[in-house]
């Protein structure tokens, strides 16, 4: 599936993309030389796929975005809102989980546990107001999300052409 990412709140639509192979034992993005492949335009998806030998045989690349990880919106919601009616935070958590696992970096236990608990609560459709009972909890979730973004920045490679 083609995944779009928005990281800058002033930008409309995705700024980065990756592919995510879903299903079976191989649920992961393309990886080359230990780095997750991201790209700046959907038309670079085929090039990204060819860089990962084990995924390059999977067939045609998707042309349409199937899921969208709006990191800018997720951070805004975590920081200041009491509802996430569109499931933006959960969508990001699920994508980040797959990508961080593919990075082969060890997420600190405190971040792993807080994001796992948050995903479970959001899956149960809990309101952010009930989840974030204090501002400290919001800051801890923000820290965990930013750790994930940093891990992906360090373990990522961005194709621009």
Image: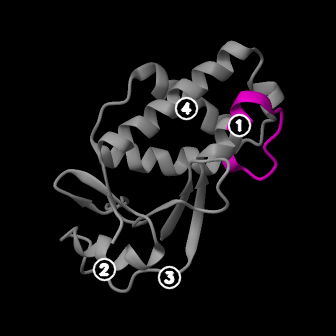
Q: Which of the two discs, 4 and 1, labels the residue nearer the N terminus?
A: 1
**Residue at x 67% of width, y 50% of height:** 10
Relative vertical location of residue 97 with respect to residue 65 in this rendering, above or below: above
Tell me the quadrant of the picture where the C terminus can be found: bottom left
- Which residue: 66% across, 47% down? 9
The residue where tag 1 is placed is 76
Q: Which of marks 4 and 3 is nearer the N terminus?
A: 3
Percent position of residue 158, x then y? 34, 58
At label 2, counting other C-alpha atoms closer than 10 Å, the crowd grade (few under 14, some 14-19, many 20 or more) is: few
Residue at the image position 72 percent from the left and 50 percent from the top: 87
Gap between marks 4 and 3 measured at Cα: 30 Å
Discs 3/1, front: 1
Residue under pointer 3: 63
- Cα separation, mark 3 vs mark 1, equals 29 Å
Q: In this view, does 11 lie above or below 78?
A: below
Find the magenta span and give its range: 76-88
């Amino acid at each position: 599936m083609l995944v779009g990412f928005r990281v800058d709140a002033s930008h409309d639509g995705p700024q980065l993309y990756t592919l995510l192979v879903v299903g079976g034992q191989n649920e992961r993005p393309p990886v080359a030389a230990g780095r997750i492949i991201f790209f700046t335009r959907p038309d670079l998806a085929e090039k990204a796929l060819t860089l990962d030998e084990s995924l390059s045989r999977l067939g045609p690349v998707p042309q349409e975005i199937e899921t969208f990880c709006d990191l800018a919106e997720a951070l805004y919601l975590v920081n200041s809102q009491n509802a996430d009616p569109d499931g933006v935070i959960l969508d990001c958590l699920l994508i980040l989980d797959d990508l961080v696992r593919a990075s082969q970096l060890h997420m600190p236990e405190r971040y792993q546990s807080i994001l796992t608990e948050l995903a479970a609560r959001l899956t149960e459709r809990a309101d952010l107001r009930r989840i974030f009972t204090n501002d400290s909890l919001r800051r801890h979730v923000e820290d965990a999300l930013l750790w994930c973004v940093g891990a992906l920045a360090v373990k990522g490679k961005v194709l621009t052409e």
